[in-house]
Image (tube, rainbow, N blue to C red):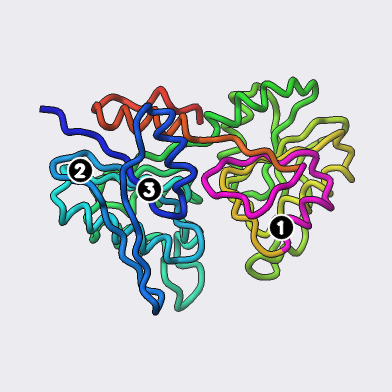
Amino acid sequence: MESKIKIFSGTASKYLAEKICKSYGMKLGDSSLQRFSDGEFEPAFNETVRGDFVFIVQSTFQPTENLFELLLMIDAAKRASAYKIVAVIPYMGFARQDRKDKPRVGIGAKLVADLLTAAGVSRVMTMDLHADQIQGFFNVPVDHLFASAIFVPYINSLNLENLIIASPDTGGTKRVSAYAKFLKTGMVICYKSREKANVVGHIQVIGDVEGRDVVLVDDIIDTAGTITKAADMLIEKGARSVRAVATHAVLSGPAYERIEESAIKELIVTDSIPLKRQSDKIKVLTIADLFAEVIEKVHSYKSISSSFIV
């Protein structure tokens, strides 16, 4: 007999889980979170999950308690005899710590993978990891989705006559190349040097953007220093317009002010992370339908290859 599917949510991603459930055609599972006076918290399932295929939706953006809440929910589902437990993590925090790039630092992405496995997760579903190799940090299957399935159709709908795709740094070259291929256009690269974390030193453009409508593509937009400097540089180099797409809108520190003051005409993001405030320059595209589709396929043991563009 096929196990019943149930979708639950951590407190940070309830807005997204509700949209996923609506797209799927089912009700969000009943769970709650009790907080103690010292700040400790205890999530609980308010309905049985015994023998069920349980999906828990929670992006692990800051604060870190969002990650710990997810771990506690996985542990609770395991101890309540769930058949399978799938962590649906649209944005995986600490993914930028994917290697030891200087002495005496940890590898945060590997630690998070180990914690999720130790908690009892059966499978992980996520989107646009900062580095593809993070999938190898897990000892359970990982469904790595791409926001290109949403962004590419939107970019096509803009009907830009002189479209060209750009990467705000050399690390995004592979991603931008894939977008350029599907959009049947060229690409340019912005080369940057960093003074320190979150502080961009110098940017230069590799390629010709004269008279072109540029779309910058990135996975994460945090303080927006890199992408806004790149946009301003592209305009200086003769670009007709600059838009940007970024999967995860972390948008910390001076990010909103930088975007408002920059040459970026439009910033398109997903709802993997909720916006802290609204902006006329920022357009949010939902990933709910894509995740609902893949959740159905995973539950039914179907191939998810058709859900990928890049």
Q: Residue under label 2, please give it.
A: 84
Q: Nearer the viewer, residue 219 or 284?
A: 284
Residue at 50% x, 58% y: name it.
61
Q: Residue under label 1, please give it.
A: 255
Q: Earlier in the sequence, mark 3 or mark 2?
A: 3
- Examine the rendered structure and indicate whether residue 281 appears above or below residue 74: above
Say the numbered circle drawn on residue 9.
Answer: 3
Residue stretch rendered in magenta on the structure:
254-280
User: Residue 84's image quarter?
Assistant: top left
Residue at 37% x, 45% y: name it.
88
The spot of residue 46 in percent (x, y) is 25, 50
Is disc 1 surrounded by few (<14), some (14 to 19) or many (20+) residues within 10 Å? some
Label 3 to label 1, Cα distance in Å? 28 Å
Q: Mark 1: which amino acid?
A: Ala
Q: Earlier in the sequence, mark 2 or mark 1?
A: 2
Q: Give the side of residue 215 with respect to residue 23, left or right.
A: right
Q: Mark 2: which amino acid?
A: Lys
Residue at 70% x, 61% y: name it.
193
User: Residue 180's image quarter?
Assistant: top right
Say the numbered circle drawn on residue 24.
Answer: none
The spot of residue 274 in percent (x, y) is 57, 49
User: Is 225 in the magenta?
Assistant: no
